Image (cartoon, coloured by chain):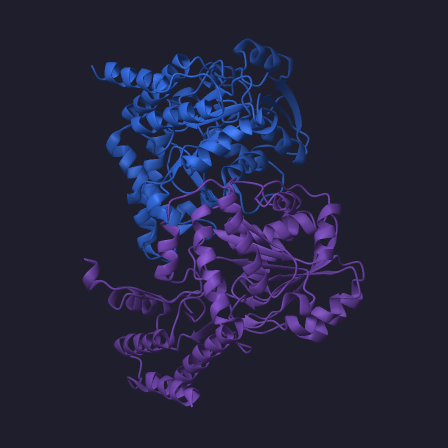
Chain colours: A blue, B purple
Amino acid sequence: MDLLNKKFLLTPGPVPVPPRALLAMARPVIHHRLPEFSAILKRIREDLKYLFQTREEVLFFASSGTGAMEACVANLFSPGEEVIVVRGGKFGERWGELAEIYGLKPVYIDVPWGEAVEVETVAEVLKAHPEARGLLIQAHETSTGVKHPVEQIAPLTRERETLLVVDAISALGVYPLPFDELGIDAMVAGSQKSLALPPGLSFVALSARARKRAEETSGPRYYFDFRREFKALEKETTAFTPAVSLLYGLSEVLSRIREVGLERLFAHYRLLAGACRAGIKTLGLELFAKEPCEALTIVKVPEGVDGAKLMKLMREKYRVTMAGGQAKLKGKVVRIAHLGYQSELDVILALATLEMALSELGYQITLGAGVSAAQKYFLEAQR
Amino acid sequence: MDLLNKKFLLTPGPVPVPPRALLAMARPVIHHRLPEFSAILKRIREDLKYLFQTREEVLFFASSGTGAMEACVANLFSPGEEVIVVRGGKFGERWGELAEIYGLKPVYIDVPWGEAVEVETVAEVLKAHPEARGLLIQAHETSTGVKHPVEQIAPLTRERETLLVVDAISALGVYPLPFDELGIDAMVAGSQKSLALPPGLSFVALSARARKRAEETSGPRYYFDFRREFKALEKETTAFTPAVSLLYGLSEVLSRIREVGLERLFAHYRLLAGACRAGIKTLGLELFAKEPCEALTIVKVPEGVDGAKLMKLMREKYRVTMAGGQAKLKGKVVRIAHLGYQSELDVILALATLEMALSELGYQITLGAGVSAAQKYFLEAQR
């Protein structure tokens, strides 16, 4: 029975959906070729520009975030072209897989998992590859919790024909990534992250030169064709049937984000991440990422504790779902999400659950120590 | 105010969503890598097999139906291969566009809009093109309301290396298209048609030989890669983050379909289509399609009536949204949908609205004549 089975979702996507958005999505579906839909679309387009901090258009697709990543590779480059790929986690690998599948020539910058790429390395590789047509990177590598220095890398790609393509799936709306100001060419996002919606929508903001590039490339694409979407937007619609109910939710969430304002949103995530890390350190546990992102806190599973058992215990006994490690980090880390619809008290309950579960698995820990460190952090931040 | 603004959606996708499914989709999102999600997935997979009448796997994607059409073209054929495309409407054209974009060599069978392809013609073209790797067709061409004779065409493709790829986006669940029995190789569907869900999910059933073919082809694909999805299903999950809330709705609708049974569902649509056509004929109006499908009734806009004005009047004054014509049929036809969450009384109100609007535009019509013909049809059918 649900009453005795209350669940908490603390994974970096999906995240809990605010009731207001759930209700919006339960509204009756309307037809997408009507003025009524165009009106919703118009608001969404304006609000997406606010969120991406751009004057350019933000396209969206009914797909997961991977679809929008594929869209960038398929639209912005032609087979045979060289692209530089920063590969420091599962999603960096995904850029590489996409580039290879589309017949591009990826030049890899391999970065140890848990570390950010060095700006100097990127500068050197760019210099060594003057023909590179793109640089593909994650703003925040969700698998390792690392924030790559997109802000410092962006200027390196401005004066040359290298498009900067940023996977911001778990970064957008979490910390400042002003699209126009930084001069990013393409930035990808997904609905189930900071937007706190169910999965099923993906986004791509495109600079003027990226939009132009999409007119010149030769690779195959249809469903994810940027040109078709731009053409459809001229008629205030989408190229293919859009995911209407998810767009209702999006409209709701975006207007809430405008009300709150990006600055307060960013400050909120800084606060949650800071408090969580204060708690983790007080517990004597180790953080995984060297340049951690506010989107989530990754904790190393301590020596002697079975990572799989830990996750299972938290999920089954306390009904708290955090994320484990992906690929080579499987069983080695716990990922606690802050992005999306999460509050100070979600940090508290995450720490409390981790404490209880570790203790139950025989790991020496002072129950409540992490929690109280986070509490102190919150109280001090309020002053 | 909504109270005075009740709306009726009678387009062939999207269709109204049953409240039970709307509520299911408003349930809190869960993480898609958990046993709880696998349990939902398991039921969905079984129920999809029932709906498609197959023992094979039915894959699904977070995308519109076009995404699944693209998936078939990208996975089942390699660039340079010959495919036969039946082109008798907007969606036949879409198969052709996809084939061209993916570098296939389409051989077109052009059919006048409003007519079904002749089985003999298909047989001749197949004979003339022994190397053809696929035959791409619509079961029901949504733009013209025509049902192509897939049942008779299917046997022609069995004894040769030509995969039969059927767009059943607006046909699945409307009339019998037993996948295994007919020997179809790939059949595409979408959530916003007979499944009565919001747009955002697409489906593809695949025969054993289509699945094998997908292992051998060389074209680029990633998000829509069948091989990745089959591999993920072995682990009871999906390759990429699925549209969780839409899947909740799907699970709800599919179990309702199993309760009702396909036979009753098909009989329901036959009844609605029959009654609607009886009404239209009594009004002296003309049907557009020669081999009409139960999914929708297409009525020619009578001489002297402005099609755009007619649609606008019905939509704005009566808040009834039917579909107009697409592409070369723009302004020339009205499409009344029966598929999805539609009942006998939806047919009645569609006819009544059409009568009032035509009358208001100065067209000579006996108010209520179409309605009463449909009523009689329903009463006689009940005996």
Q: Is residue B258 left or right of residue A34?
A: right
Q: What residue do we see at 42% from left, 17% from top?
A: A365
Tell me residue A75's x, y (percent). Answer: 56, 37
Q: What residue do we see at 24% from left, 17% from top?
A: A379
Residue sitting nearer the eye, A375 or B346: A375
Q: Is residue A175 left or right of residue A120?
A: left
On screen, residue B355 above or below A119 = below
On screen, residue A300 above or below A197 = above
Tell me residue B11's x, y (percent). Answer: 40, 65
Q: What residue do we see at 59% from left, 61% from top?
A: B49
On screen, residue B86 above or below A203 = below
Q: What residue do we see at 44% from left, 39% from top?
A: A59
Residue sitting nearer the eye, A96 or B173: B173
On screen, residue B145 above or below A136 = below
Residue A13 appears anywhere in the view: no
**Residue B151: which quarter of the image?**
bottom right
**Residue A205: which quarter of the image?**
top left
**Quadrant where the image shows the C terminus of chain A:** top left
Tell me residue B39's x, y (percent). Answer: 52, 49
Residue B55 appears anywhere in the view: yes
Residue sitting nearer the eye, B219 or B236: B236
Tell me residue B362's x, y (percent). Answer: 28, 78
